[in-house]
Structures are given as C-alpha cells and as structure tokens.
Image: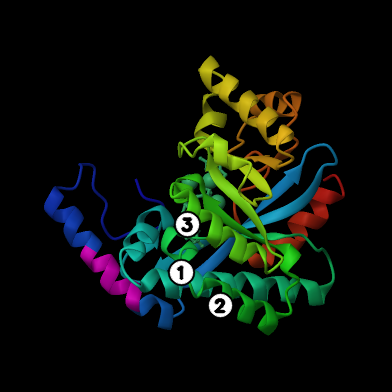
Amino acid sequence: AKEGGGNRCQSFEPSFHEQIQRRITIEHNLRKAIERKEFVLHYQPQIDTRTNRVIGLESLIRWESPEFGRISPAEFIPVAEESELIYLIGEWALREACHQNARWQEEGRFHVPIAVNLSSRQFYDQKLKEGIEAILTETGMDPQYLVLEITESMTMHVQKALSALRSLKSLGVHVAMDDFGTGYSSLAYLKEFPIDKLKIDQSFVKGIRHHPANASIVSAIISMAASLNLEIIAEGVETMEQLVFLGGQGCGVMQGYWFSHPLEANRVPDFIAKFNAGG
Ligand code: C2E
Ligand code: CA
Ligand code: CA
Ligand code: CA
C-alpha cells in the first residue's frame, strides 16, 4: 500500500486505464502544487561510521497533495520529467536546499554538505549552471557544500555527460554518481568523469546477505572507487550485518534506515547534535 492517507485504497492491481488516469491527474495537480507550496524537502543523514558523525545530508522531495495524500517522488518525478514541470520542481528543490543550509548556518550548530538530486532533463538543461549560480549567490551557499546527485544511467551519452559535468563542476560544487552499479555506464569512462563520489545502489546492499554475487559486486565497486580516488557511500543500509560487511570492505560512509529515515528539516539539528554526541 502507498504510504500516507491517499484516497484510493485498493487491494488489486490498477488497470491500465486507471494507471493512465492517475498519471494525467497527477500531472494536472503537479502544475498547481508548486504555486500552492505543497512540496517539502526531507533530509536523510549520511554517517561516517569510523568517526560516528553525520557528515552529510541528502535532500529528498515530498509532495503532500490535498487530492492524493502523500505521493512518492518515485511516482511523480517521472511524470514531471515528461514535461517542463521538472525544471520548476528541480529549481525549487535546489533553492529550498540552499536556503535551508543558510538557515542552519545562521543557527551555527552544524555545517555539513547537502546533496540535491538532479533529474536527467535538468542535468542536460543548458540553463542549469546559470540557475545554480544565481541560487548560490542568492543564498550565500558555499558551493563546496552543495553536492549534485546524478544517476549513472544519465551518463550513457558520454560526451554530452562530460560537458554537462565540466560545466557544473566549474561552479565549485561536488557531484555524486547515484545508484551506481545499475546503469551499465562505461567503466572505461568513469575515470574521465569529474565526479567526487559514488553511491552504491541500495539493491546491492540489500542483496549482501542472500546473494553472494551482490556482495562481490559491492566489494568490487568499493575497491574501484578507492583506485579512482572517489569517495564512496553505501545507501539503503538497514541492518547491522550490512554495516559490518560494508565497513569491513572499506566503505565507511553510509546512509539508510539503520541510522535514520529522511527527517523533516526542523528535526535535523537535534538529530545531528544527539548522534554526534554518541546518543
Ligand atoms: P534516490 O535518490 O536513490 O534516494 C534514495 C531513496 O531510498 C529515497 O526514497 C530514500 O527515502 C530511500 N531510502 C533511504 N534509506 C533507505 C533504506 O535504508 N531502505 C530503503 N528501502 N529505502 C531507503 P524516496 O525519498 O522515496 O525517493 C525516491 C527517488 O525519488 C530518489 O531515489 C530519487 O531518484 C527521486 N527523488 C527524490 N527527491 C528528488 C528530488 O528532489 N529531485 C529529483 N529529481 N528526484 C528526487
Ligand atoms: Ca539520490
Ligand atoms: Ca540512490
Ligand atoms: Ca534510486
């Protein structure tokens, strides 16, 4: 079942027709959602398990729709991607994350990088660099504290990806390659990409226990990241067993429900203070 109080509660698979209908209605409502301020960012802590400190936050968008209840970004981002709406939503998320960073800065309680997910159309938008530059100026955000997450599957067109990456990196921001291991990107080009970190996809982390192949893939990704001088982070860490395995393989930075679900912004400062204090 979908989380939140959606008004459709079905125990059967929706028909093709129903799926199309829902898509159309979602797109229609997405247009209004921006003006009505129905989006909010939650932040999931990223932990360095060697020092037991929070060393980053990933922003994850949430849509509280009066019509549908809470809708997962996994459902509405792909819908937005099919229209120019993704530019508006993407820009909103970037601005909101940078503003939130500024507010936390003013409170002066912690200073950690914030990751923002980019969609494919956003990443290849010629105007993205300018837009980010404006947001950085507007919010006074230190570009080194902004991490842009792109997925591996977005880098299939190597030359286009390279030039988009170079353009963004010239701003001084960092780039992480998300969902790594699922996108069949050319390993030969990986070393050419000016990226800073790899995020091991959670499907591999999940499979560590029961599928020896997944454990081998995870080890291979970790050693490859080390040899390419890339930071590495594992996502979807839910168990102590996964934590121990990853740590043993040399991956110290992790994100997942084991440590924390994505949090509302106002809960982040307390979480970080308590976690860093060892509580
Ligand atoms: P993602 O970037 O791969 O984000 C990780 C997803 O895994 C998030 O789902 C997060 O809540 C979830 N997660 C974190 N830890 C665990 C865990 O231990 N176990 C499990 N099972 N899941 C965990 P979420 O927030 O529903 O986001 C889904 C996807 O939607 C994201 O996948 C990303 O592709 C997209 N998305 C989210 N926010 C944005 C955004 O602001 N812009 C864009 N373009 N896409 C976004
Ligand atoms: Ca991500
Ligand atoms: Ca991911
Ligand atoms: Ca994903």
At which x and y percent is residue 161? 50, 55
Image side of residue 25 versus residue 115, left or right: left
Q: Quadrant of residue 269?
A: bottom right
Q: Nearer the viewer, mark 3 or mark 1?
A: 3
Dot 3 corresponds to which residue? Answer: 160
x 52%, y 18%: residue: 213
Q: CA distance from mark 3 to mark 1?
A: 11 Å
Q: CA distance from mark 2 to mark 3?
A: 19 Å
Where does the magenta region start and end?
A: 24-31
Q: Looking at the rendered structure, which numbered label has been put on residue 125? A: 1
What amino acid does circle 1 point to?
Asp
What amino acid does circle 2 point to?
Gly
What amino acid does circle 3 point to?
Lys
Among numbered discs 3 and 1, the one appearing first in the sequence: 1
Q: Is residue 198 visible?
A: yes
Label 1 within 8 A of ligand 1 by Cβ: no
Q: In this orientation, which residue lies closer to the viewer: 118 or 189?
A: 189
Instruction: Please identify the quadrant where the N terminus is shown.
Output: top left
Query: Is residue 28 one of those drawn in magenta?
Result: yes
The overriding secondary structure of the stretch rendered in magenta is helix
24 lies above or below 231: below
Q: Secondary structure at mark 1?
A: loop
161 lies above or below 126: above
x 84%, y 50%: residue: 276
70 lies above or below 141: above
